[in-house]
Image (cartoon, coloured by chain):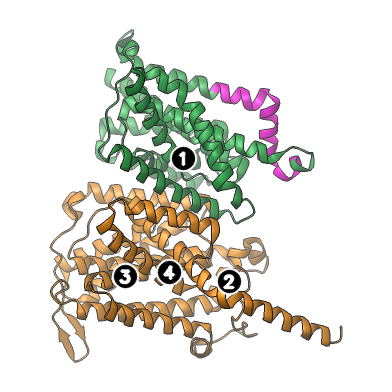
Chain colours: A orange, B green
Amino acid sequence: MSAIPGRPPLPAERPGPLQLLELLWRGRAWNQLALLLLVIVGLFFLVPDPSLAVEVLIYSLWAISLNLLLGYGGLVSFGHALYWGFGGYAAGLALLHFTHSLWVALGASMVLCGLLALSSGAVCLRRRDVYFSMLTLAFAQLGYFIAFEARPLTGGDDGLGNIPTPPLDLPGLSLEMHPIRDPLPYFLLCAGILVLAFAFALLYTESPLGRVLQAIRESEERARGCGYNTRLVQLVTFTLSGLLAGLAGGLDAIFNGLEGLQPYWSLSGLVVIMVILGGRSTLFGSVLGALVVLLLEHYLSIAFGDWPLIVGAVFVVCVLVFPQGLWGLVRLEPLGSWGAVAWTRRLRARTAREPGP
Amino acid sequence: MHLIVNQVFTGVVSGAVLVLLALGLNLIFGFMEIINFSHGAFFMLGAYVGFYLLTAFGSFWWGLALVPPLLLLLGAAVERTLIKPLYRRSAVDPLLLTFGLTYIVTQLVEMVAGKQGETVNAPSQLNFQLPLGFTSYPAYLTFVAVLAALIVLGLWLLLERTSLGLIIRAGIRDSTMIQILGVDFDRFRVLVFALGIALAGVAGVLDSPVTGVYPEMGNDILITAFVVVVVGGMGSFWGAVLSGLVIGVLVSLTTLFASVYASIVPFVLMILVMTFRPRGLLGTT
């Protein structure tokens, strides 16, 4: 998963914010954003169950946040449900006790999750590879037990219920929202947030910081040899990832009016499956993974109660046979490999023509 | 006072089960450089196979005798079919694969045996209280501790005193070198993986009369086993033994004094160890 053909080369100087935007506009990144919009439009018109469509958007956001760590950082977090759940509790408690503003509630879940990710990431990132995975898992389990025992605050295993739905306040507009009766405003809200977060994540992965992150994934020693503070870069990514996961969790809690307590197992695992199945090499793959897994769940659970078995089997086959996921399959098989061959040929012809040094 | 002694014993017993799991994880990690995420699933599978053998033959001992060879075979089969294709890939892929495998095994068991789980009776020969001077203790739990200690001792002798153990230890230290020296590394990978799985199975059988069998039992204990491995020091044999016992006793004592915090204790300990001694209690690097 080193150089991806078709990726625009890194500019020689440090790109400023304007150049980054230009990159988004011209490069491969732009195609991904277009694909995301296509998915959103498709969800809007093709998915008969509106709450399923909203769930796909929210889980896509969550999967993107994990993909920053897993795909771009090579850091397999098995405890991403911690930030999802914490964000949900934060937004729910804020709406129940402190505020009636949607933005304040979502802001609270983002900021608090960012802080939680910063502090837990500082411990988890003390070790690498599999140790890191174990530590994230342990943190998620710790969070689960705390939420379970803090019954007065979180409702224990009954979950935190009756979260009021705040109105959608936009400049010059205030819209009452009823996620169950009329999910359209909520769908549009989630779609807007997802597009913004996706664009942010794209810019992050294309930025110098994001490039260093990918360099660390390939070889941490070399990145450190180049003088980068690898742990800091990873910690920044971990924090951003936790923050986005918290946002997704907050959106989900407000949408359902409930923050249920689920064991790490059914949640952290699900999002890892989404990212891997969709394809970890691109951010759009995560959206694809969330879409496929949730649709599978929705339609399989009607026909076959033990649908996780099928999802698990598909996942194992995916890791064994096509580790780049569905997106890798789409991109590489019909077009990409041919494109890569042509590209190599062109490169070879060019190097043959050029005189040696 | 009696209560405290009893709780310490209970902690040692639950710690002994953790030690068996952690040693298997450690062995597989050290030799093959993969984390076996499905270790908990095989622990659960061992417990269920033991339970079905108990109901079929009417004796606990059949389960204890037959589960290790059965899981040894199963482990070898899993290694050959699923893990072997991933040897040249990044370290993340086996982790993900074994994670998916856990998902499948747990779902299959739920399909076959149902979600709610069963209770398992301790063997009737050990269904009495062992007098220990000033207090008494269930004989079965004492048996678990003694058997686990024997298994640990046997494993240590295997690693330290046999030529097979020599190869395993050499492989843990430098796998490239022993391949250059002409050892058929591939064969030992199967063996080590199968050995680790068999250890998990034995732990499952031993634990089943204590906690009963249920499909999620492996997931719950796997995380604690991970904590044991990290706290003890990755790849450290005696580190895993020490931290397994320490965590078992600490959890057991917290249950007595402040049961609310009992499930949090291992994680707090882990965070402390990670902060002040990242290589683990007895880890070397």
> B245 left or right of A253?
right
Q: Which quarter of the figure has residue B29?
A: top right
* Chain ID of residue with mark 2: A
Name the residue tied to disc 3. Answer: A56
| Quarter of the figure with the C terminus of chain A | bottom right
Callout 3 secondary element: helix
Point 32% across, 26% down: residue: B210
Q: Secondary structure at mark 1?
A: helix
Secondary structure under tag 2 reads helix
Sequence order check: which comes first, mark 4 or mark 2?
2
Instruction: Rate crowding at label 1 as few (under 14), some (14 to 19) or many (20 or more) other CA atoms within 10 Å.
Output: many
Q: CA distance from mark 1 to mark 4?
A: 28 Å
Q: Which residue is mark 4?
A: A286
Q: Start and end of the magenta stretch?
A: B153-178
Against B31, residue A52 (above or below) is: below
Instruction: Identify the chain of the residue marked 3, using the numbered disc in the image.
Output: A
- Separation of disc 2 and disc 3 at Cα? 30 Å
Can the viewer see residue B282? no
Whether label 3 touches label 1, CB < 8 Å:
no
Q: Which residue is mark 2?
A: A212
Pointer 4 indicates a residue of which chain?
A
